[in-house]
């Protein structure tokens, strides 16, 4: 019994030691740094000029912290993959349960609001470089429209392959746009055409709108795929 517990104990001690060193050894900022040299002031002073975006949040998330955004997209992909894998392990009789039919108000109300919700989601990620919003928020709104569709049409089969195709193409587009910046300037997701368009116009911000379109489509199709899997229709 003791021999079986030794590997688990060793792994636990290793994890605990790593966490301890992370908190003790890793610095959390320099107290003597002049406020004028802070990163936030740098972004505020130069963000609009360097990225061509009137939304500084977009400048930080998509441009300055673009590699972190790639990590966030990867985490979402792994979460969606995990949900699909867990549901695929369930017995067939538990994968799909027949729910109650939607009421008349739900059916007709959903038919009217689904296009509006989807259109609003597209608006949110298309205008992410101009106003609050972006690819993640717009993608979630689009997935909400997909969820409402499944509620009002429980008998309707949905193409899981199409969702996977959109997700894959959007992911490749996102990475491809990042590699363009890496090839031109040596920085992943660098906005190499930041001066394109007029500041404040829809067609502006260089690569930022294209990046948000890729993120919006990927997040929307990925979360829709999660809902699709939880419904029990995943292949």
Image (tube, rainbow, N blue to C red):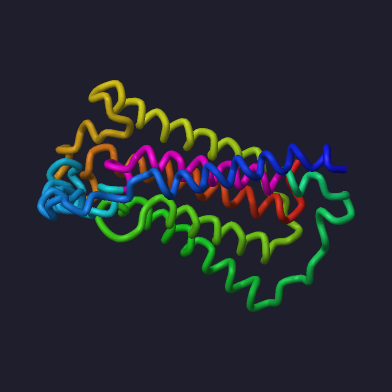
- Residue sitting at 50 percent across and 61 percent down? 115
Q: Residue furthest front?
A: 2
Depicted 228 relative to depicted 11: above or below: below
Mainly helix, strand or loop, the magenta region? helix
Residue 44, x across and y down, in percent: 15, 53
65 up-or-down from 98: above or below: above
State the image quarter where residue 84 is shown: top right
Q: How many numbered discs, if any?
A: 0
Q: Does residue 158 appear left or right of residue 24 in this picture?
A: right
The answer to whether residue 216 is seen in the rendering is yes
What residue sits 65% from the left and 71% below the top?
107
Q: Which residue is at a point 31% across and 60% down the rendered structure image?
A: 132
Q: Residue at x 39, y 43 (%)?
A: 25
* x and y percentages locating residue 213 in the rendered image: 39, 44
State the extent of the magenta-drawn residues as a range: 61-84
Viewed as shown, does residue 193 lie left or right of 147?
A: left
Magenta highlight on residue 64: yes
Residue 228 to residue 111: above or below? above
Quadrant location, the N terminus: top right
Q: Position of residue 15 (x, y in %)?
A: 59, 43
- The picture places residue 80, in percent across and down from the top left corner, at 62, 46
Residue nearest the viewer, comparing 117 with 8: 8
Asked if residue 167 lies left or right of residue 1, the reply is left
Residue 182 belongs to the span the image colors magenta: no
Report if residue 200 is visible in the image.
Answer: no
| Quadrant of the drawing holding the C terminus | top right
């Amino acid at each position: 019994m003791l021999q079986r517990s030794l590997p688990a104990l060793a792994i636990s001690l290793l994890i605990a030691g790593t966490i301890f060193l992370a908190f003790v050894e890793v610095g959390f900022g320099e107290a003597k740094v002049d406020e004028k040299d802070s990163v936030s002031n740098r972004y505020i002073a130069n963000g609009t000029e360097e990225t061509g975006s009137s939304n500084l949040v977009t400048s930080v998330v998509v441009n300055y912290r673009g590699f972190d955004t790639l990590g966030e997209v990867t985490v979402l992909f792994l979460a969606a993959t995990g949900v699909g894998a867990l549901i695929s392990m369930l017995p067939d009789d538990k994968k799909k349960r027949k729910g109650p039919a939607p009421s008349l108000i739900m059916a007709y109300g959903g038919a009217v609001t689904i296009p509006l919700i989807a259109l609003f989601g597209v608006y949110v990620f298309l205008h992410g470089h101009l106003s609050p919003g972006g690819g993640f928020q717009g993608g979630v709104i689009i997935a909400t429209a997909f969820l409402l569709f499944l509620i009002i049409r429980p008998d309707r089969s949905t193409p899981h392959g199409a969702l996977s195709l959109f997700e894959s193409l959007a992911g490749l587009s996102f990475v491809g746009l990042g590699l363009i910046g890496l090839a031109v300037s040596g920085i992943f997701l660098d906005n190499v055409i930041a001066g394109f368009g007029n500041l404040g116009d829809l067609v502006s911000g260089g690569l930022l709108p294209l990046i948000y379109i890729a993120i919006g489509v990927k997040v929307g199709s990925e979360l829709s795929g999660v809902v699709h899997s939880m419904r029990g229709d995943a292949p």
